[in-house]
Amino acid sequence: MTSKRSITAANETALLAKVVKTVFFARMDFAAGVERFHTEIGPKTATHPIHGSEVYAGIGDFGGIDGTVMESVSGAPQAIKLSLSGIKAAFVTTALTDNYHRRDIEIMLGLENEAGALLADPEILFSGFMDKMDVALNQNVGQITLTCESRGTNLLRASDHRFTDEDKQAEVPGDLLGEYIYRMIDLQLFWGDKTFFSPFFDRTIPFVGPRGFGTPTG
């Protein structure tokens, strides 16, 4: 999915130039560290809208993007594939052992002049997460195909949370949000009954109801 439906004025102006070239930037948040690549040759500095100025390594014809970045009318999630070929076996090992599943990835589109200089800061074209990586190794030379999903797939997945006090404590130790969840399953409430006693309140603490009732009994 695209990050927005409009581009900056600077990139609009760049599109009107007599000669304009496109370059793609990929920023992948692996557990071992962020990897940055672009589709030309040599290092290139680009400004990310959040992370600021960063250096991206050029992969030239060894990299590619398979798929169309588009916005679905039905809101269905879209997927794209990134490919990297002709790489050393050491990098293949990193791809196999590093934690990448459901970690962030962003694809940016930049516009350049004839000399290869960016005419404006790149625009985020795709924002999602890394889903599946296919690796092939032949004669110590590897090829990697990375399938990336848009964040819309989160709407199709069941939540991993169990919505229990133990689950909440594991996420935020000391949080009291889930303390009474288990009591609410079979709880019966009698709204306005001055004799009703709530299990959520200490009996020893004086209780004043909405109409000035005294300490409840029961």
Image: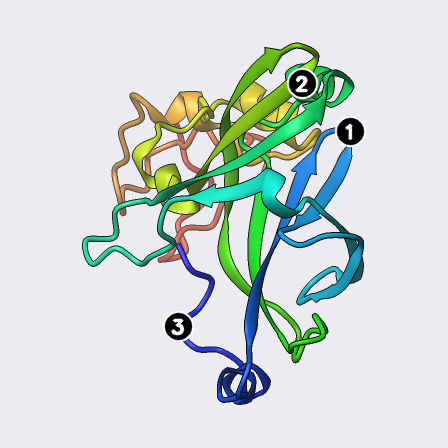
Position of residue 22 relative to residue 180, above or below, is: below
Question: Which residue is the site of mark 1?
Answer: 32
Answer few, some or many: residues within 10 Å of disc 3's Cα (few below 14, many 20 plus, some between 14 and 19).
few
Q: Secondary structure at mark 2?
A: strand
Position of residue 161 relative to residue 26, above or below, is: above
Answer few, some or many: residues within 10 Å of disc 2's Cα (few below 14, many 20 plus, some between 14 and 19).
some
Q: Earlier in the sequence, mark 1 or mark 2?
A: 1
Compute the Cα span from label 1 to label 2.
22 Å
Q: Position of residue 154 (x, y in %)?
A: 39, 38
Identify the residue at horizontal 30%, vertical 35% (top origin): 156
Instruction: Using the image as rendered, state which of residue 61 and residue 204 is in the foreground.
Output: 61
Question: Which residue is the site of mark 2?
Answer: 141
User: Could you tell me the amino acid type at mark 2?
Assistant: Val
Position of residue 106 relative to residue 2, above or below, is: above
Direction from residue 17 to residue 93 in the image, left or right: right
User: Could you tell me the amino acid type at mark 3?
Assistant: Arg
Q: Position of residue 217 (x, y in %)?
A: 40, 30
Identify the residue at horizontal 33%, vertical 34% (top origin): 196
